[in-house]
C-alpha cells in the first residue's frame, strides 16, 4: 500500500506506462516490418532483421516524443 501511494505521489506509475507504451510500439512495428519483408517481399533474413531494427527504433523514437509531449 505504501509503495502504491509513493508511486502515485511521485508519478512513477505514469512513467512506467510511458515506457511500456514505447516498448510495445517498437515491438509491434518491428514485428510488422519483419513479417512484411520476410514473407510478403521474400527478402533475406539479414535484410528483414535490419529493417525490423530500423523501423523498431524509429517507432520507439516517435512513441517517446508522443509520451513526453507537453500540451
Image: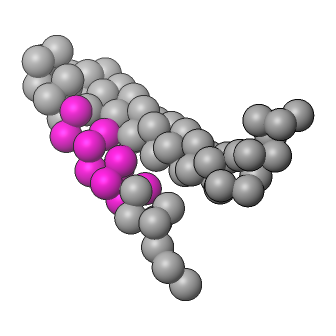
Q: In the image, is residue 62 part of the stretch drawn in magenta?
A: yes
| Point 26% across, 43% down: residue | 57
Magenta span dominant secondary structure: helix
Front position in the image: 70 or 52: 70
- The magenta-colored residue range is 53-63
Residue 64 in picture, x, y percent from top left: 40, 56
Residue closest to the far bottom: 71
Answer with the quarter of the image where residue 34 lies.
Answer: top left
Would residue 56 be visible to someone looking at this image? yes
Answer with the quarter of the image where residue 44 lies.
Answer: top left
The answer to whether 27 appears left or right of 53 in the picture is right
The answer to whether 26 appears left or right of 4 in the picture is left
The answer to whether 26 appears left or right of 61 in the picture is right
Front position in the image: 32 or 28: 28
| Point 58% across, 43% down: residue | 16
Front position in the image: 8 or 66: 8
The answer to whether 32 appears left or right of 54 in the picture is right
Q: In the image, is residue 24 part of the stretch drawn in magenta?
A: no
Q: Is residue 54 above or below residue 35?
A: below
| Point 46% across, 73% down: residue | 69
Residue 58 in picture, x, y percent from top left: 27, 50
Q: Is residue 35 above or below residue 3?
A: above
Q: How many marks can you see?
A: 0
Residue 26 in picture, x, y percent from top left: 39, 40
| Point 14% across, 29% down: residue | 50
Residue closest to the far top: 45
Would residue 41 be visible to someone looking at this image? no
Amino acid at each position: 500500500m505504501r509503495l502504491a501511494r509513493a508511486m502515485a505521489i511521485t508519478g512513477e506509475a505514469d512513467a512506467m506506462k510511458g515506457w511500456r507504451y514505447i516498448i510495445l510500439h517498437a515491438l509491434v512495428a518491428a514485428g510488422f516490418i519483419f513479417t512484411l519483408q520476410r514473407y510478403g517481399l521474400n527478402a533475406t533474413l539479414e535484410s528483414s532483421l535490419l529493417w525490423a531494427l530500423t523501423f523498431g527504433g524509429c517507432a520507439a523514437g516517435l512513441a517517446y516524443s508522443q509520451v513526453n509531449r507537453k500540451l
